[in-house]
Image (cartoon, rainbow, N blue to C red):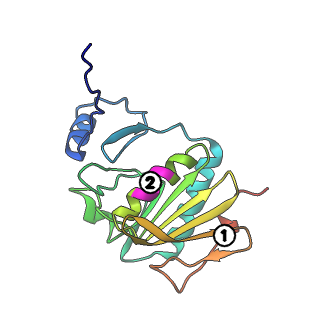
């Protein structure tokens, strides 16, 4: 009996954007393209929404002119990846991205509860391979901030675990500090 090889269909960012433009996906679906695979993300719980707002508010306070702090908007990172990180700090102003999505970021933050494995396994590697200098995971499960830095050969060579009482200075704004406790909900 002959057998056929079953292959996964990988999508390019161009194909993915065409599907979005044509209304292929339901407007309420939260989806993103990661290395050619379209993932449907789970609905946000209130705790996740709190984390996104806490991170966005903190980063907007320290990143001023010359940066745009974007919340849950696409990044055109590669030909087969268009993630929508919870928060991304990108160079320039929001008006720089009228015609196209940003292609890089100085800092990306994912808020993780039910998406923790996805954010660690798939996104950490993607962001490192694309040269994102700094990636944070606000880990709501363990109530900590995972800080990834120094990407080399597709992996982050530095990983820090910070908790309530610690603070972190973004690489792009080393003169500032974000108290980790300000990002976490009260116990």
Relative horizontal placement of residue 127, taking residue 117 as reference (left or right): left
Tag 2's secondary structure? helix
User: Of the residues under marks 2 and 1, which one precedes in the sequence?
Assistant: 2
Specify the quadrant that holds the C terminus: bottom right
Residue denoted by label 2: 123
The residue positioned 56% from the left and 64% from the top of the image is 57
Q: Does residue 112 appear left or right of residue 69 in this picture? A: right
* Label annotation for residue 89: none
Q: Position of residue 144 (x, y in %)?
A: 67, 62
Indicate the position of residue 35 as horizontal and vertical percent values.
33, 48
Residue 125 position (above or below residue 165): above
Q: Main secondary structure of the magenta part?
A: helix
Q: Residue furthest top?
A: 1
Residue stretch in magenta: 121-125
- C-alpha gap between disc 2 and disc 1: 20 Å
| Residue to which mark 1 is pinned | 162
Query: Image point 27% across, 13% down: which residue?
Result: 1
Camera sees residue 87: yes
Q: Is residue 71 visible?
A: no
Which quarter of the picture shows residue 93? bottom left
Q: Is residue 178 above or below residue 146?
A: below
| Residue 124 on the magenta span | yes
Is residue 47 highlighted in magenta? no
Q: The residue tagged with tag 1: helix, strand or loop?
A: strand
Residue 100 lies, with reference to residue 2, above or below; the image says below
Which residue is at the front of the view, 30 or 94? 30
């Amino acid at each position: 009996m002959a057998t056929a090889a079953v292959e996964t269909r990988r999508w390019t960012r161009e194909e993915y954007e065409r599907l979005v433009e044509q209304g292929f996906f339901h407007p309420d679906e939260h989806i993103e393209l990661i290395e050619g695979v379209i993932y449907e993300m789970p609905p946000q719980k209130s705790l996740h929404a709190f984390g996104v707002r806490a991170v966005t508010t903190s980063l907007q306070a320290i990143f001023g002119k010359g940066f745009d702090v974007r919340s849950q908007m696409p990044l055109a990172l590669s030909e087969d990846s268009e993630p929508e990180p919870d928060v991304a700090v990108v160079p320039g102003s929001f008006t720089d991205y009228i015609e196209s999505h940003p292609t890089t970021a100085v800092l990306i933050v994912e808020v993780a509860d039910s998406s923790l494995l996805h954010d660690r396994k798939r996104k950490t590697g993607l962001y490192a391979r694309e040269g994102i200098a700094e990636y944070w995971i606000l880990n709501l499960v363990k109530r900590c901030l995972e800080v990834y830095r120094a990407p080399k050969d597709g992996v982050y060579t530095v990983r820090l675990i910070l908790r309530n009482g610690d603070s972190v200075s973004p690489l792009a704004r080393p003169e500032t500090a974000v108290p980790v406790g300000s990002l976490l909900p009260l116990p």
